[in-house]
Image (cartoon, coloured by chain):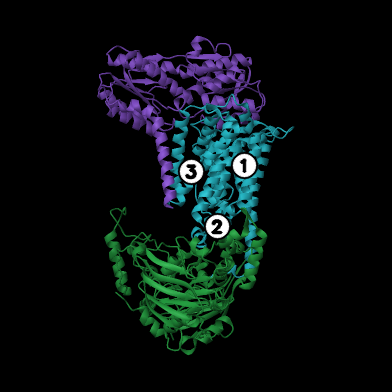
Amino acid sequence: MAEKLLKMEGISKAFPGVQALSNVLFDLNKGEVHALLGENGAGKSTLMKILTGIYQRDSGTIIYQGNEIEIADTKEAQQLGISIIHQELNLARDLTVAQNIFIGREPKSGFRLFLNEKELNLMTQELFDRLNIRLNPGELVEDLSVAKQQMVEIAKALSFESKILIMDEPTAALTDSEIDSLFTIIRNLRSDGVGIIYISHRMEELKRIADRATVMRDGTYIGTVNMREITIDQIISMMVGRQIYQNQRPEIKNRRIEKVLEVKSLNRGSTIKDVSFDLHQGEILGFAGLMGAGRTEVARAIFGADPLESGDIYIRGKKVRVKEPLDAVNNGIGYLSEDRKQFGLMLEMDIKANIAIASMNGFVQTGWLNKLNINKQASKMVDALKIKTPSIHQLVKNLSGGNQQKVVIGKWLTRDSDILIFDEPTRGIDIGAKDEIYKLLNELAAQGKSIIMISSELPEILRMSHRVIVMCEGRITGELINDEKISQELIMTLATKRIG
Amino acid sequence: METQGPQLIPNDKKKIHLKSNAIQQFLAFGSLIILIIFFSIASPNFFQFNNIIGILLSTSVIGILALGATFIIITSGIDLSVGTVMTLCSVMTGVFITSMGLPIIVGVLGGILTGATAGAIAGIAIAKFRIPPFIATLAMMMIAKGLALVISGAAPIYFTSYEAFTEIAMGSIIPGIEIPNAILIFFGMAVIGGIILNKTIIGRFTFAIGSNEEATRLSGVNVNKWKIIIYSIAGIFTGIGGIVMAARLNSAQPALGQGYELEAIAAVVIGGTSLSGGKGTILGTVIGALIMSVLTNGLRILSVPQEWQTVVVGAVILFAVYTDVIRNKKAN
Amino acid sequence: MKKKSTIFLAVMFLFSLVLGACSSDQSNTDNDSGGSKDGKPYIAIISKGFQHQFWQAVKQGAEQAAKEFDVEITFEGPESESQVDKQMEMLRAALDKNPDAIGFAALDSQAALSLLQEASDNKIPVIAFDSGVESEIPLATAATDSRAAAALAADKMAELIGEEGEVAVVAHDQVSQTGIDRRDGFVNQIKEKYPNITIVDIQYGGGDHLKSTDAAKAIMQAYPNLKGIFGTNEGSAIGVVNAVSEVNRNDLVVIGFDSGKQQIDAIKNGLMTGAITQNPVGIGYETVKAAVDAINGKEVQKNIDTGFFYYDKDNIDDEEIAAVIYE
């Protein structure tokens, strides 16, 4: 029987008008990776915030290393050895790796007045050696890849001598090989006796790394299972309360009717090299590749968000000049960024404003807003896209990820865009909502919209695309028809195929 | 990405949000009422028609500047040039009317145009040349200050022989009631500002740019163009402020103006507009400007030493912004 | 985009042209002031300001004397009277030009001491003017006796209100020497000589016309029985006049300080009862004259009182007054 590190029992927490957690159970052994699963709003974050001292529970007990404890604030949690790595990285980009890890705890010399940079780097190196992380302590964080930044976060968390490490979607921004090295570190930590609470939406990953999993739904405890004894479908049905089949194949119909978009020899520095491809009406064209392969860069260039060095873009056979997003939008292109909050939405504004923003010319008469028409259109979109909201006056920041994505889709449908570029359309969206987004994409394609879909999840690519373009290091390394011959392995080979 | 507890049921969220919004509106307005009641009890001379008119009159110039600044602050920009551009506008009006002998109306329009031009230049520098608003308007502040001195020859320009000009601020367009036009202009501009901000495409893009400039650009909005327009509109407000100021003083004083921009910004901030952009109301700014002048006037009537008046106003700014922070925290 | 940038640059260029053209006449004297190349003695004058009419009048007097005694002068001062540091830079730059004499009106005497010492070490005579310099270094000080001038304002105020009742002061500054002297000169005189007059309030408008207007209005509102207000400089006095005309309290006795077109007009049309004027032209003239004497090794008088006058509707056109007031 493994040694119990943590036991949370009967945890309840209410917010004004909402019972966020009721009677939740969770336990963690030493040297275990314990996945915490549930759809958005299931209460995972609230539970973790109670464990890290951000929220105080209303009732229940927390037993840590055999003693009942109270966690008053985040500092106390840190002192107890409970650390969390948030999904968003919280690093000072202009400081070095070592400076970030020991921020606020810098070794000092000379009457504690001066910083001892040498000692700092030495301490960091020792930490890295212990964790088997290969990073230069003196390097600037802004020069590191996302994956390496994540390593820095992990090292920082563990520099507090953590006994419990909470990881919230640690692989969201990582490529497969980066995920592999993250897992190596996690396994090392596990053998050192650290208890890891692992939050993720990626089921395949959990199979590889987690020992046990606790599933939550709507603020309640559903059950704890041993990962070796359960299938992904079973876990998913625990999460959503119904059966969902993940490995669907697309309803492939060849829709090569008319060339809508033609891209010829795009170039932009080292990120886009000689990229050419076509997009047909009613088609979903998948863009596969590793992180940094240049897919987002191509999308942004076509959309005019970043300037091009050379290359031509033809829409319905006519050459167009796209220098600004405005030009792209006027040519019927819509772009749904991978980072909705930063590039897609005005979070502090309401649904109707977000839906109307790309089509304002249609909603003004000599400068005056036609609020009636805006409201009508917003209501239409909310109905058509099944956006879950009490009203169109709701601020977008209060919506879930899936509904936020639908608002962005609504924005482009309102603009009547024919070509839609979806960059990671289901990132950060829970499984139930993912399904709806997929359905929407298929419907849009059936209506004759042409869709470019960038995705890092191969099952998603295979399920949705009619054709697949694979990129590696700024170049197109392959174009595949999604038929029986295609496989994840084939795509991965192309995605790692370096040309010149 | 999981959202936190209270967002589980959007319905309740909405209610909480509305409530805290209402609380903030009430807080600002309530503070104003409490101040007025306090001063009325403290001194019998405070709550009198003449004094109330006096307070409104002393609010008018800063208030008009603050209305323009509200637009800029909602875009998450800042305008440090309003004080000296206001002065430049009054000097230009003076030159047009007294030196060039143009009709008063032309001089007034010329002054307003000066403000719009200064705003447009700042806007172009910010939007096209990517100079941060703080720096661009700091430069504009100095340019306007220097130009005002150069053009006026560092001497005041008097409108003594143009009585109609003084009437712009001190006359009374409503017969029978002695309300100086300056006050009516202030409230009139507030109404116009409110309409632009809430009913027109300019206002919509003001909020959109402040809320998320990049997302707005990626929605196919010509952000640069709208920024220039917004800064120009703020410049128009500044120009009107300059004309009201000149009309009230019956002269264009080239050495005045610096420091007014900070008072305008303070009024906007007290009114609940967030310096991080995307949020703000014209009504809030009007209340903010009124709070400042009620406070100053009341403390003067109580003969509180000037030094302490400044301390109190500073404390009020801290308090006002703190309540705003609390509100945002609660709303989240 | 390119086209618009060009327009922007053109506008900026025009701006700089305007700036350059208009300021060239000012910088002329600066440019050929590099020491006494052409044989003429060179006197650097650092004043407390240059934008206000008062300083322009001082400059005028200085230029008049420069012409008369055939010397070269430069005249500069910071933009506002709080910019002590800027004034120090100007003094520093003036010293570096190795002038034959320096005329100096200190914003802050203490801050200037080391530079003045340097002048003294280099045998450059220093003539203080306006509020003077608290130090033994200046050979002479050409200034108005501010306290005596404000006391005269108090006497006039007392006389006009019948030596009893409430009066108030709108001052321009609570830290500068002239602000303190004029306020205290007025207040002390009232306290000592007129026991039936009470000073009910002293407010500060920073010399800003608009702020002084609001301050004066608040005073009138708070003290309905007020009989008179003393404004301690041009901006303050105009502010008081504005306030009086805005609330129609023409019965109030308003006494101002210095002159300028608006004060002169106010006195002529009765909104202002009278004002104290210094002799700014005389200050500038006497400063240069003393400097010339010092350069020529002549004895100079330690305290040169440049005088002050009370003027009102009746004597404003007298030759003596007309010579010292400025529009």
Which residue carries the number 1 mark?
B290
Q: Which chain is green?
A: A
Q: Report helix, strand or loop for mark 1.
A: helix
Apparent side of residue A291 relative to residue B269 in the rendered image (left or right): left
Please provide percent x and percent y for residue B152: 48, 29
Q: Nearer the viewer, mark 2 or mark 1?
A: 2
Q: Are marks 2 and 1 on the same chain?
A: yes
Q: What SS does tag 3 mark?
A: loop
For disc 2, the neighbor class at 10 Å (few under 14, some 14 to 19, many from 20) is many
* Cα separation between marks 3 and 2: 22 Å
To which residue does mark 3 refer?
B80
Residue at left offset 42%, top offset 88%: A485
Label 1 neighbour load within 10 Å: few <14, some 14-19, many 20+: many
Name the amino acid, label 2: Ala
Establish whether labels 1 and 3 are both on one chain: yes
Asked if badges 3 and 2 are on one and the same chain, I answer yes
Q: Is residue A467 above or below residue B8?
A: below
x%, y% of residue A500? 29, 74
Residue name at image x 59 percent, y 48 percent: B271
Q: Mark number for residue B208?
A: 2
Q: Is residue A231 above or below residue A94?
A: below
- Which amino acid does the dot numbered 1 rest on? Leu
Q: Which chain is cyan?
A: B
SS label for mark 2: helix
Dot 1 or dot 3: first in sequence order is 3
Q: CA distance from mark 1 to mark 3?
A: 21 Å
- The purple chain is C
Q: Please name the amino acid that badge 3 sits on.
A: Leu
Q: Chain of mark 1?
A: B
